[in-house]
Amino acid sequence: MTRFFVSPEELGNDNIVLTGENASHAKVLRLKVGEQVLVCDGEGRECLCAVVDSGWNLEVLDRRESVSEPAVQVSVYMAFPKADKLEHVVQKATELGVYEIVAFPSARCVSKPDEKSLKKKLERWQKIAASAAEQSGRGRIPRVVILPSFAEALKRGAESELPMLFYENEQSTTLHMALNSGQWKSAALLTGPEGGLEEKEVRQAMDAGWKVCTLGKRILRCETAPLCALSAVMYAAGEF
């Protein structure tokens, strides 16, 4: 079923009007009067609607919580990678059901965007998340968050019920072991940049309450690791 995203305020109306890009999309799709569509507010609520006329007025038939959103909230924390790798992670993590994507600098980051370029990148990342959410049938658009430091990322992520950092030199604690450590409804998954995390950063994370885990015997690329971990967590949570 065709899906459109509008603001929470618009979703609260008894009749919804598609405007701007939504109206253009509806025109391209050649939606017919009486055809049903889903309209979402990007925060997990949606309405089943029927097209009333060619002006893209919609009649609300039913309001509900989105049935496609995962029951667990999983955040991906990723140190700034080079080039457009974060775009790939934002898109694929959104498809997999991520709650939010958090980007931050770490000691070995090659990419160190300034405030001006970060603003442009953030706009692009958020658009990619919105497009991926629409394509994958999500009712919520994951938010992309930028933090100023590794310490801020540790502090924020540690507030989740299960904060996990993935480190290539960890030998004993596997992701499977961490996931079986108790009941949880929220998780934070932290991965490093191309050069990995420094040992002192890993110790800092442990002091902040993070579980340090291995993702196996093979070294994963920085854009592969968070998606691998996210997929495994969603599977363990019964989402797949």
Image (cartoon, rainbow, N blue to C red):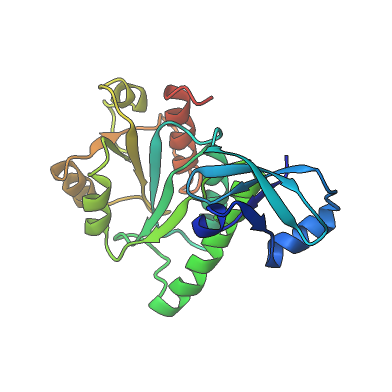
Q: Nearer the viewer, residue 52 or 127?
A: 52
Q: Is residue 103 above or below residue 159?
A: below
* Residue 17: quadrant of the picture: bottom right
Q: Is residue 156 left or right of residue 65?
A: left
Instruction: Please tell me how many numbered marks the rendered image carries.
Output: 0
Q: Is residue 116 left or right of residue 210?
A: right
Say whether residue 139 is visible: no
Q: Name the quadrant of the N terminus.
A: top right
Q: Name the quadrant of the C terminus.
A: top right
Query: Residue at (53%, 45%) from the top-left corner?
Result: 94
Residue 130, x across and y down, in percent: 58, 55
Query: Residue at (47%, 49%) from the top-left corner?
Result: 43
Residue 85, x across and y down, in percent: 53, 56
Query: Residue at (44%, 57%) from the top-left corner?
Result: 144
Query: Residue at (21%, 52%) from the top-left corner?
Result: 155
Q: Is residue 95 left or right of residue 226?
A: right
Q: Is residue 200 left or right of residue 59?
A: left
